[in-house]
Image (cartoon, grey):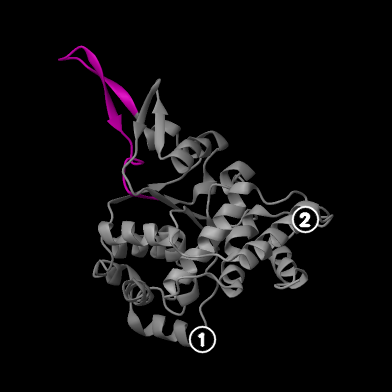
Amino acid sequence: MQKLLDQAVNEIGSVLLGKETQIRLALCCLVARGHLLIEDLPGMGKTTLSHALARVLGLDYKRVQFTSDLLPADILGTSIFNKERSTFEFIPGPIFTQILLADEINRTTPKTQSALLEPMEEGQVTIEGSTRELPAPFFIIATQNPATQSGTYPLPESQLDRFLMRISLGYPDHEAERKLFQGGSSLKKLNHLKCCINVQQLVAMQNAVDAIHASDNLLDYLQRLIAVTRESANFAYGVSPRGAVSLLRSAKTWALMLGRAHVVPEDLQMVLPSVLDHRLASSVDYHSDSDSLSQKLLQEVAVIV
């Protein structure tokens, strides 16, 4: 499994240069059965990473460009009257796929954003009184521009909590940017990416995560981290039980990716910012950078008591 995941990382790295850590975190998120939010400035490679992930996993995928006039029915589907049969027929929307690329998710209205809540949590959609199952596996990979950009609607906490991870790509380093200049269009390279992990292998990896061992000492460390977010005056609110479970599962998946059958504190520390940053807020300045909160959390809580 480790070899397959390394191959996938290298394949994506051929179109997204110098971002191995972010690529590994993104794969970790999907193997952990989570949804991924990629936040950064326009032109940083968010959509490129999304397309590359879909291709190397060999899953069916569709892309929706989120705009201010997008409606829930544009994503979920709607019923259309068939004159010949004199009945209404349901036309599935793009969400009926294995990977949905929700591009610039925060450029649509809260009403349309809320259409994703049930699919992300339960893997199904309820339309016109009927519940329809989504394909399995089902992932949403969403991109968003920073809230300071014009024309954006902030994602509510209930929506953010359904994303297992939020990552940012950042500017490329000097060497990676030079290779980007010399290598030509990443879009052309995307079309030649190989599928490295098929559906059966992906499901096997997801099931293997359940078998990764977390010791009592590791769980004690996890609970101390979570407790600080709920009890410290520095935090506006604490991490939810869903967030705590997500953190543990992400750490187990990171251990699996490194070829280990057990979790160590370093696994927890590696994934914690990506899992918790979008779930934390400062009690002093609600809109302050949550990145600093997660780093303070890691600095303040001892691994061993």
User: Is residue 184 part of the magenta span, yes or no?
Assistant: no
Residue 265 on image: x %, y %: 61, 72
Res. 110 image quadrant: top right
Q: Is residue 135 left or right of residue 140?
A: left
Amino acid type at image mark 2: Ser
Q: Which mark is residue 282?
A: 2
Give the residue drawn at x 74%, y 72%. 299
Q: Which mark is residue 97?
A: none
Q: Which mark is residue 174?
A: 1
Residue 269 vertical placement versus 36 (above, below): below
Find the distance from the CA under tag 1 to the CA under tag 2.
Answer: 34 Å
Query: 173 or 263, which lies in front?
Result: 263
| Whether residue 131 can be seen here | yes
Q: Residue furthest top?
A: 86
Residue 99 on image: x %, y %: 35, 51
Q: Which residues are magenta?
A: 78-101
Give the residue drawn at x 30%, y 65%. 56
Residue 84 vertical placement versus 164 (above, below): above
The answer to which of marks 1 and 2 sits earlier in the sequence is 1
